[in-house]
Amino acid sequence: MRNRWRWGSPRSPGGLTDTMDGHRLAVSRLLPPTGLPRAIAYQIVMVAVGSGTFLSGGVVFFTEVPRPHLVQIGTGPSIAGVVTSLPLDMVADRPGGQWSWAVGSLCATVTPAANTRL
């Protein structure tokens, strides 16, 4: 039978394993447990990718089309984020994290749909 090296094994040359099971083991350590924690992690990754794409595209758009000063591009969203995030943080702390996550997800889903033109 083949020897399988694991993390922390004194004979382990690279740290992981010499079989495909090691890759599955390493990936399973990175993923949260199934159910709600994994759904929240998936949503966080999707929101981060979408927000990063939208924000970087928005900066390119605002520097090319309306051509405002760069200070206006930086300070406007910063002030808006501070003004809205602090009160919303206090509101979200009252009912609890799971309920706030569900309501926030629902609002994030409904808001773009309400702004689309048919």
Image (cartoon, rainbow, N blue to C red):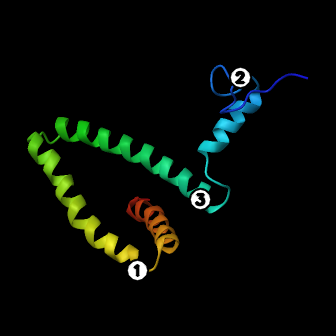
Residue receiving disc 1: 94
Where is residue 94? Give x, y as percent: 40, 80
Classify mark 3: residues with Cα within 10 Å, few (<14), some (14-19) or many (20+).
few
Q: Amino acid at mark 1?
A: Arg
Residue closest to the eye, 70 or 99: 99
Q: Distance between the Cα atoms at labels 3 and 2?
A: 35 Å
Q: Residue furthest top?
A: 13
Question: Which residue type does callout 3 highlight?
Answer: Pro
Q: Is residue 37 visible?
A: yes
Question: Which amino acid does the dot numbered 2 rest on?
Answer: Arg
The CA span between labels 1 and 3 is 20 Å
The answer to whether marks 1 and 2 mark residues whose Cβ atoms lie closer than 8 Å is no
Residue 70 as seen in the image, left or right of residue 85: left
Residue 11, numbered circle: 2
Q: For the residue carrying disc 1, how many other residues have a C-alpha within 10 Å: few (<14), some (14-19), or many (20+)?
A: few
Above or below, 64 relative to 11? below
